[in-house]
Amino acid sequence: SRAIAALSLTTLPANCWEWGDLIPGLSTSRHATDELDESSFDPFIRSHPTAAILFYAPWCFYSQQMMPSWDLAAQKLMLHDPPIHLAKIDAHRYSVIGDRYGVLSFPTVKLFADDAVFDYPEDQPRGWQQIVKWVSQHLERDHVLKSGDDVEHYLHDNDLNVVGLFPEGHNSTMFARIARHHEDVIFAEARGTDVAKDVATHLARHASLVCETVDVGDSRENSKSADLPRERMECNSAPRNPQRPEWRDRFQATVEGKRVTVKRTDDTGGWLQHLQLKCCDPEPAGGSAPRLQIPVPSIVMFMPHDERFSIYDGDINDMHAVDKWISARRQPMVMRYTPETAEKLFQSRSGMMPALYFISQEPAPATEALLRSAAQKLRGRAMIVLSGLASQMEQRLADVAGVDKDSAPVVTLIEAQASHVARKYRLPLGAGTSADTVVSFIADYEQKKLTPWLRSEPEPSAEEQAVSGVGILVGTTFTKLVHDESVDVLVDFYAPWCGHCRKFEPHYKELAKRLRHVKSLRIMKIDATRNEIEGLTIQGFPTVLLYRAGKAPKQVVTYHGNREPDDMVRWLTENCAVRFDPKPPAGFQ
């Protein structure tokens, strides 16, 4: 039997009712997708061989939370050629249907395609973008814009959009393959010269305006106000969120300053739908601004940052070049370090651009300015990220980068790595640092000319070594002392805050004292929280490693035994490459 994957195993029960059942004048439906029941489910599946179904429970918080995303996904997937229908069913009420398809928790999403049923991955986000991508990847279908009017629906709430405008006879297979490479970008295409030109005209108008989707939400009253991003915006009174044909809700939007007030005009009651409006900055008086010209064929991209709109100016049949052009515009050229950007920055993915971080306790406008200037020349090669030291998240980044609170501002490149400690490369800042210096630094990184920066404490003095009783290593001395081919070296990797390390310390000192007569053995320690070793990740504290004498690379043996001196002496006599007598010679002091 088919394994069932559910979107969420957590449900939060609540009273199951709709405002429309209790308050006159309110619409009785909140969501735009078709609602199925026990009698309509099978006919729907028969009449729509390809369809996605949301199995939900009205008392489930996560089911209700997912509904707006489901409506938007339905709107986008209707632009597929042929369209893909989305519907939903209360699988708690109609448990016969839920049981038939193995629904074990809510919400659960299933794709029905050509007599096969596919389950939505339970570890995947439930945003409309992820739903659309999941369906498209299963069916190998793409958004097709059949007229300029489709542009409104396609661009609605899409943060990152790429549109291909192709004339008659153009083979757009390559464009479809590129779409599979970018999970966070929505792709669409217009096929045919006339359609492509019509779509290009509508896209040009969107490119010339700065528009936002404003969330108004539902309302128990006849009117409701919401904040706008900017003053003097113009808001369309028609809802931008998906609508069902039978909904009669009509609205009037009025803007004053940075507030929009929405009033329902067809009824004195409120509304249940999560109302959204499209609000744009005003067009120049008299339409005097030159209208952008988008050629056919071409590929264009909308993004919520930097220039907001771009037309690809290379060979549209060069898949690698187009792919690189899109990747370069997925993120802002310069971004602040936030929870949203952090998740993307530290993804370990093939082809991921390196990130250059500027970490500073205080604002440094001059350095930021030169980094912004360099970003213009580094687009598609490196991302520039600005971070402070105030929040816990910024402090964690600083810790990874080896930056202390009292450090001077630092510019460091950090590689995104999943399997080992991220390499870091520091750019020295000084009076002569310029945008060209930054560009040259990235060029040296690309050509593998840079040496990784490793955190290190200051080298200990002879007096500090003598007081310790155990040899002290730091990052800058590790290679020289530990990889000496003539001696065995035992190293205790510890953390100052580790209780087990503190308990082990007197035993380790006693071991060093007992074997101080053995000239072929060095017994040493290193604070692994304040010193970094290239290619080495310590998973727990204390970790004790023996680097056996011999040619590089030295053989490394991990000590797993009892931490009493007697046990460790016995283990060392068995594992050191250079044999020794654990008993000191007569008269040794």
Image (cartoon, rainbow, N blue to C red):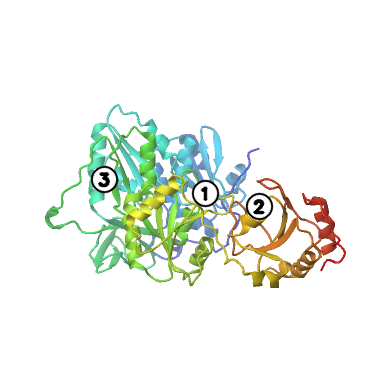
Please name the amino acid that badge 1 sits on: Ser
Which of the numbered marks, if any, corresponds to residue 483? 2
Position above or below: 15 against 153: below
Q: Which quadrant of the view contains residue 102?
A: top right
Position above or below: 167 against 345: above
* Residue 302 in picture, x, y percent from top left: 32, 48
Which of the numbered marks, if any, corresponds to residue 348? 1
Classify 10 Å Cα crowding around label 2: few (below 14), some (14-19), many (20 and above).
some
Q: Residue at x 51, y 57 (%)?
A: 453
Toward the right, the furthest residue is 586
Determine contact: label 2, label 3, CB under 8 Å: no
Q: Residue at x 24, y 35 (%)?
A: 296
Which of the numbered marks, if any, corresponds to residue 203? 3
Q: Of the residues tagged 1 and 2, which is closer to the observer?
A: 2
Please name the amino acid that badge 2 sits on: His
Q: Of the residues tagged 2 and 3, which is closer to the observer?
A: 2
* Residue 269 in picture, x, y percent from top left: 35, 65
Going by the image, does 465 lie left or right of 286? right
